[in-house]
Amino acid sequence: MDVPDLVDADMEEEEDVVVTGMGWDEDDDDDIGDGNDDLLLGPVKCLFCDRILNSAKEVFAHCGSDHSFNIPSFCGRWSVDCVGYIKMINFIRTQHPTADSLRSLQPSNDPAPWEDDRFMMPADPEDLLLQYDIESEDCSVGEVPEMAGFPAATPSTAGAAAVMSPEAAGLKPEELQAYMVQRLYEAESRATALEANLDRAVSDLNQMRDKAQRLIGADGPAWGSHSNNHDGDDFCESSVGAIQRLSLTEDEAYFSSYADFTIHAEMLQDKVRSESYRDFIFGNPEVFRDKIVLDIGCGTGILSMFAAKAGAKHVISVDQSEIIYRAMDIARENGLDKQITFLKGRMEDVKLPYDKVDVIISEWMGYFLLFESMLDTVVVARNQHLAPGGHVYPDKCSIWLAGFTDAALRAKIVDFWDDVYGFKMSCMKSEVVSQTGVDITGKDKVITNPCVIKELDVDTCSLTDVDFAASFSLTCCKDAVLHGLVGYFDIGFEAGCSKKIHFSTGPNSTSTHWKQTQFLLKTPLEVKKGSKLDGSIAVKKNKKDPRSLDIRITLDGTTQDFYMD
């Protein structure tokens, strides 16, 4: 597959494409047009708030509409050249003045606060505003300079001037004309800002309406809701596409959680996880050599860098979390920024710089494999972007159940509520046994054989495979008290691999950050060695929060509902 020119006419038409970290060379200037339009695409933070825009020009427009700060006009008012512009941007980034305080400055009376040469040091070397050619702008457009000796107009004085005659206003006709022109520009700016605010309000209203419709629905509360008001028939309903229907606002908490550095440290320090991916990628260079690779949910970019080092032609790394900015720094620090393109956004929303990719890699697995529902995103991306003959890794997944005994755990989690400093709180028991636990289950606690309840091939599975029901049979290995079931998953990298790699998150394997999922029974069962326990399990997304799971287990004729959030 040929590597296309990442900055071409087609990309210029896609305003939401975010391309950064490409390591542009000065020699490329002849190929990229005037720079302001072609090159300055990427996440750019506003000068006065935390809003992230898709280009330098979008920041200019946003500052004008939301902060009433017209950057080109302000530069023209202060006769700012390219050096002064760089100093001004770095001054604003480091000193954090308000737009109002900057507008109040008068070139005739106040020295420019950014004149100090220390503001030549970039606050952020990757700040695309610093690369903007301000001298290419018409810095007289969008704002009329205030007349010497003539005070800035206010809404009240503007209204007065509009109805007063030149003689009554004490102004010469030419002064009044200039004054009115200035007021017209200010009115237009306010109208633009109000229109933008109205658009956002309408968008927010639509999101709230859609969310309300999903929450209440014509069919009532979700099976497995935290109120425990379960409707058994609800389980038959499909949740296909629920993740893709989430708005970015609804999904914000999920992505924000992955901005925490400690989460990424925990995952990177999980040797079973990280070394399995490393050994798969470096052990199968034929899978990656000269290939276009898509890394979904790239985090710190470790898988992307593995792929780049393994000979990938180019890697596209996608993540909506703020951690992607650190991933850009990490790639640059390791000299891989030219080989990796970082796109900030949800996989469902971003525009890729290639029509198709050869390989998709992702560490999408959650607790009990399916928690957080990131597999949905991988499947959708596979259907849209994977070239014929390409593969998704990991590709083989299986979920397992086994029975365990742990009297100490039950005493801590359940029996504790019988006597809390002399008070009975037994009503809490039904809630705590309905919530799954995530912890390490010692292999000595497992008292049945394991049984696989679901197998997935990520190369071929569909969204309908993620909600599933299965029967199982467990054979007891000893006389004991069964306190619950333990769930875990196994992972394999197999398709097209000369060196197949597997790892397990089960009790008999080295512990991982996934640990195991524990389902405590409301009523423990006494079991005998050799006896069989027949049961069934049904798993689906929670209707109110599709990244959470509702799980129904029937064992020995008793049905119990669990939720995982």
Image (cartoon, rainbow, N blue to C red):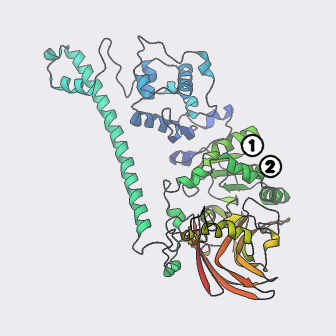
Badge 2 or badge 1: first in the primary sequence: 2
Spatial separation of the CA atoms under disc 2 and disc 1:
9 Å
- How busy is the neighbourhood of tag 2: few (under 14 within 10 Å), some, or many (20 plus)? some
Q: Nearer the viewer, residue 319 or 32?
A: 319
Q: Is residue 308 visible?
A: yes
Residue 461 point in image, percent of width and height: 65, 73
Above or below 258: residue 431? below
Q: Secondary structure at mark 2?
A: helix
Q: Residues within 10 Å of mark 1 (few under 14, many from 20)?
A: many
Quadrant in the picture for residue 491: bottom right
- Whether residue 235 is situated above or below residue 414 in the rendered picture: below
Circle 1: residue type: Leu
Q: Is residue 159 left or right of residue 456?
A: left
Give me the residue at 77% from left, 78% from top: 450
The residue at 78%/75% (across/down) is 446
On the image, the x and y values in percent for residue 219 come to: 42, 75
Left or right, 235 with respect to 126, comes to left
Name the element at disc 1. loop
> Looking at the picture, which amino acid does disc 2 mark?
Lys
Q: Is the residue under label 1 in contact with that under label 2 (CB below 8 Å)?
A: yes
In this view, 340 is above or below 33: below
Location of mark 1 (residue): 336
Query: Residue visible at 71% across and 72% down?
Result: 487
Q: Position of residue 484 (x, y in %)?
A: 69, 75
Q: Residue 549 placed where, x, y %? A: 58, 69
Residue 504 or 478: which is nearer the viewer?
478
Residue 152 falls in which quadrant of the image? top left
Disc assigned to residue 552: none
Q: Quadrant of the N terminus?
A: bottom right
To which residue does mark 2 refer? Answer: 309
Residue occupying the point 83% across, 58% down: 279
